[in-house]
Amino acid sequence: MNTIKLISIDIDGTLLNDNREITPAVKKAVQEATAKGIYVVITTGRPATGVKKVLSDLELIAEDQYVITHNGGVARSTDHANDVYHEELPWDLFEEALTFAKEKKAYLQVESDEYAYTLNRESNVFVAQENFVVQLPLKTVDSVDELKDVPFVKAMIIGTEDDMDRIQAAVPADLKERANVVRSTPNNLEFMNKIASKGNAMLALADKLGIKQEETMAIGDQENDVTMIKAAGIGVAMGNAVPLIKNAADVETTDNNHDGVANAIEKYALGK
């Protein structure tokens, strides 16, 4: 087995348990890996604001540590001093996603590093939950033109799981072909640059650090993790992962309530 030099770890449903906590065992394993010189890269659909506490709790904020946010739209040093990878959603694809959302009478917002923006005057409980978790204040704008100068990375439709299932199934084939359309949670559907993905961002970062693909490991549980699970030298599915991830992974660990991340790091990276 190749020596693992970079571990890409999803947050929700992976790093965190169902109480949104990092367990002592997970924290210990991450710190042991870091002390050994392994890059532990938190890789999330969240914007930068939604990962600050996690990085702080794991003591990963430094100029030589890295984080991947916006589902792979951005990879940068955890002190925010250096962008390694940055792929924004093109304006024409945003307009198509917005038109589609309006047709479906669905709520849509875009996210920058500092705010979420929407044209919708009415939201839902899942919008409030999303923006609370990722710590993004929501701004409502009156015109789409007001968004032209906003450096947003992705657009997101938010609603009930049933609505997201229905809406995802109805995304036009042309839009799916030209954009990366993916679910991060059961309650959202995200539209990103076609080449923006957790897998591509992980590989771009590994290349910058002189790390071979086979020296990477990725751990995840949801649909938006599939690109990094497939790209990594060792793709690890959480015990609570959706079937898509379990089918794509090389191995499976325990679930997020039973130290799945710690068990994977110890077994495949630390050789315990």
Image: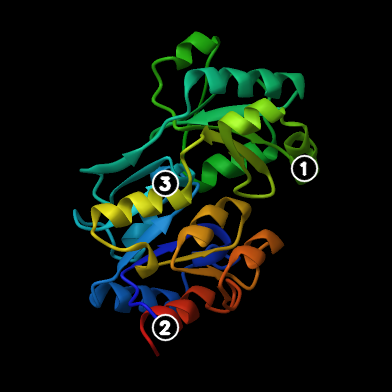
Tell me the crowding category of disc 3: few under 14, some 14 to 19, or many 20 or more residues within 10 angstroms, Cα based.
Answer: many
Q: Which of the two discs, 1 and 3, labels the residue nearer the N terminus?
A: 3
Helix, strand or loop at mark 1: helix
Q: Tell me if residue 16 can be seen.
A: no
Which residue: 54% across, 9% down? 143
Q: Amino acid at mark 2?
A: Glu
Which residue: 48% across, 78% down? 264
Q: Tell me if residue 108 can be seen.
A: yes
Q: Quadrant of residue 216?
A: bottom left
Helix, strand or loop at mark 2: helix
Camera-side residue of 17 and 248: 248
Tell me the crowding category of disc 2: few under 14, some 14 to 19, or many 20 or more residues within 10 angstroms, Cα based.
Answer: some
Camera-side residue of 100 and 134: 100
Q: Amino acid at mark 3?
A: Thr
Answer left or right for 201 relative to 59: right
Residue 35 x, y percent position in the rendering: 24, 76
195 w.r.t. 248: above or below = above
Residue 150 x, y percent position in the rendering: 41, 21
Answer left or right for 59 relative to 54: left
Helix, strand or loop at mark 3: strand
Camera-side residue of 11 and 231: 231
Q: Which of the two discs, 3 and 2, labels the residue nearer the N terminus?
A: 3
Q: Which mark is residue 234?
A: none
Residue ID for mark 1: 165
3 and 2 marks in contact (CB < 8 Å): no
Count numbered badges in the picture.
3
Residue 97 x, y percent position in the rendering: 62, 24
Residue ID for mark 2: 266
Which quadrant holds the N terminus?
bottom left
Residue ID for mark 3: 69
